Amino acid sequence: MGIFLQVVLPIISVFIIGYLLQMWKKLDVKPVSAVTIYVFIPFLVFQAFYDENFGGEFSIIVLVNFVLLFAIIAITKLFALINKWERSEESGMILATAFMNSGNYGTPIVLFALGEEAFRYAILFMAVQTIIMNAFGVYYASRGNYEIRYAVYSVFKMPATYAIIVALGLNFTGVNLHSRVVEMVDFMAAVALPLMMIVLGMQLANIKFKQFETGKVALGTAIKLIIMPVIAWVCVMLLPVSDLLGKVLIILAAMPTAATTTMFALEFRSRPDLVSSVTLVTTLLSIVSLSVLLIFLV
């Protein structure tokens, strides 16, 4: 109960504020989301990569991201083969299971549960996950309707990608920014996290679905909240991972479905009702699943 009250409840409370605001005012979420994605997240990502002392830990973060992605895609494809799903069903399930909400939800959970050093790992994980989601997420949402180059283009139209490139360039060349510039970056980065949390609440309020496919939603929820964190745990056991980083990887793998995948599914008409259903159910059930997980990890 203590973990729930100290870690999960404060974060859920911010989501609820965004949710209630949206239910009350019926705001257009797109401009708010765009400001978050195109202005504040790039500063948050830049801050993390500019200050990072790169070593084996970052390589492990990248590796685990890809292991989780391909493992879940393989599992989902196996279920698609067994159940003879159509391509649109397979794509919708991949969108619903392969991409976690490591940004709006995962980073604050890690910060509240494990502290500032763990939060730094979470930001790096989020940055890698964002690139992966904008490439593979768009591909699976749009395959059959758009060329694969659209997925690649989606990565390079995101400011966070360029923030990473610039930060890495400064980091590796040893160029130090003026203290006032660093203060401005820190100031902008500090806004990103609470704004991301409010936006998630607003996005959840906008989720609507006409058809609830109980069997697929249950399967997608099990894959997302049970199988993915188990895969992350296996990775942590097999790789030379520090205790703190290991906990961060498992927590982030246990996050619910990323709300961004619902937007992909809507834009490309890739079973949006299914993706929305899994997103909402995993987000609600994660209140319990994360509380239980944190009892064992924290």
Image (cartoon, helix red, strand yellow):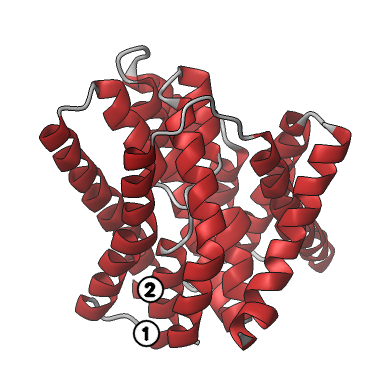
Q: Are marks 1 and 2 in contact (CB under 8 Å)?
A: yes
Instruction: Give the structural element (helix, strand or loop) at label 2.
Output: helix
- Picture residue at 30% right of the left edge, 49% below the top: 69
Q: Which is more N-terminal, label 2 or label 1?
A: 2
- Picture residue at 11% right of the left edge, 36% below the top: 82
Q: Position of residue 161 (x, y in %)?
A: 53, 43
Q: What residue type is labelled 1?
A: Ser
Instruction: Give the structural element (helix, strand or loop) at label 1.
Output: loop
Residue 57's tag is: 2
Measure the C-alpha gap from mark 1 to mark 2: 8 Å
Q: Where is residue 195 in the image (x, y as percent from the top left)?
A: 76, 52
Residue 193's tag is: none
- Crowdedness of circle 2 by 10 Å Cα count: few (<14), some, many (20+)? some
Q: Which of 244 and 180 is in front in this view?
A: 244
**Quadrant (top left, top right, bottom left, bottom right) of the N terminus:** bottom right
Q: In the displayed structure, would residue 235 be above or below residue 154?
A: below
- Residue at which label 1 appears: 242
User: Is any part of residue 168 visible from this angle?
Assistant: no
Q: What residue type is labelled 2?
A: Glu
- Picture residue at 82% right of the left edge, 61% below the top: 187
